[in-house]
Amino acid sequence: MSIKIENLYYTYMDGGPFEKTALQDINIEINDGEFVGIIGHTGSGKSTLIQHLNGILKPTKGYVIINNINTQQKNLKELRSQVGIVFQYPEHQLFEETVKKDIAFGLIKQGLSQEEIDKRVIQSLESVGLNESILDKSPFELSGGQKRRVAIAGVIAMMPKILVLDEPTAGLDPIGRDEIFGYIKKLHKDFNMTIILVSHSMEDVARLTDRVIVMNQGSVFMDKPSREVYAEPEALEKIGLSAPQITYLMKRLKKSFPNINENVFTVEEA
Ligand code: ADP
């Protein structure tokens, strides 16, 4: 078991006049090597949930255990080396003078040897389709898509067992999007990395993941194999899809899962 979340509640500004319960009674178990999508409306609790995975937020109640590490504990070094989180628009956090220094930043903090750092910088760049030619460039000279990839490489370089991505392709064009998803799929396959993808895009989640968790108002509304979730009209409604969007999605899904039993598509065509 890679991730175990039990009876998790989280309240912002707990006890204050503006307290806000963002998560309630969350119970989720994720095994090594799963590829899980988390979807839900804005404000449904997705980012609050993922920030519990490396201890940025600590449960108000309940617990989160990652590979036997309880996130309540004070020393988070081991946890942070196991869980990499790529936040939305991660390129906003690039700050070093060169691409190389930016990717190496976390590795230096981990106390790795220079040789190991150099190796990992190159490997992680390659895993997002970039090469050494940009190592000495300033991150600010790069295109939007390249910056995004450098930022993702900085997380991958830590070789996390669990990679969490919050809308990793937001704002990219369709080609950039497909490329990044291609690299994520490859990481999942080659290293059996556990991937958690937070997305608004039903289509991306349907195409990529094995399992979907639908969040609604701070609770898990549904947690099922991807192909089943999309056969549930109320799940589709909950995430705000219109009838034409549902019809379109069903058609795309039939392409993605050619062997799927047609009966699972219970949604009426619009
Ligand atoms: P999502 O990622 O699905 O958009 P969030 O986890 O950001 O949802 O938000 C869940 C709820 O918690 C929302 O009602 C949001 O307004 C509230 N919230 C998020 N961050 C904070 C914060 N820093 N302080 C107070 N409330 C917050």
Image: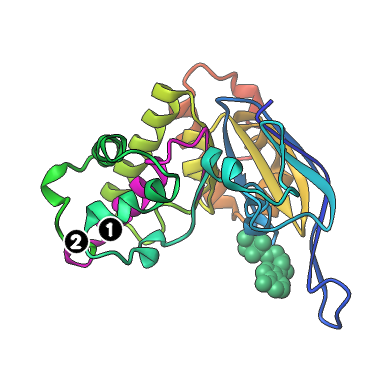
Q: Residue at x 10, y 47 (%)?
A: 133
Q: Could you tell whether 97 is left or right of 87 in the image?
A: left
Q: Specify the label residue 40 is tagged with.
A: none
Quadrant of the frame with the N terminus: top right
- Say how many tags the image has: 2
Q: Specify the label residue 142 is tagged with.
A: 2
In the rendering, at what x and y percent does residue 211 appear?
A: 62, 32
Q: Specify the label residue 147 is tagged with.
A: 1
Q: CA distance from mark 2 to mark 1?
A: 6 Å
Q: Nearer the viewer, residue 174 or 106?
A: 106
Q: Residues within 10 Å of mark 1 (few under 14, many from 20)?
A: many
Quarter of the displayed picture in which ligand 1 can be seen: bottom right
Residue 250 shows in this picture: no
Q: Are marks 2 and 1 in contact (CB under 8 Å)?
A: yes
In the rendering, at what x and y percent does residue 262 appear?
A: 59, 22
Q: Could you tell whether 256 is left or right of 114 in the image?
A: right
Q: Residue at x 61, y 45 (%)?
A: 38
Residue 147 shows in this picture: yes
> Looking at numbered disc 2 in the image, what kind of residue is underneath it?
Leu
In the rendering, at what x and y percent does residue 182 appear?
A: 34, 35
Q: Residue at x 20, y 43 (%)?
A: 130
Residue 196 occupies quadrant: top right
Q: Nearer the viewer, residue 3 or 41?
A: 3
> Looking at numbered disc 1 in the image, what kind of residue is underneath it?
Lys
Q: Could you tell whether 220 is left or right of 248 in the image?
A: right
Q: Which residues are magenta?
A: 140-165
As helix, strand or loop, the secondary structure at mark 2 comes to: loop
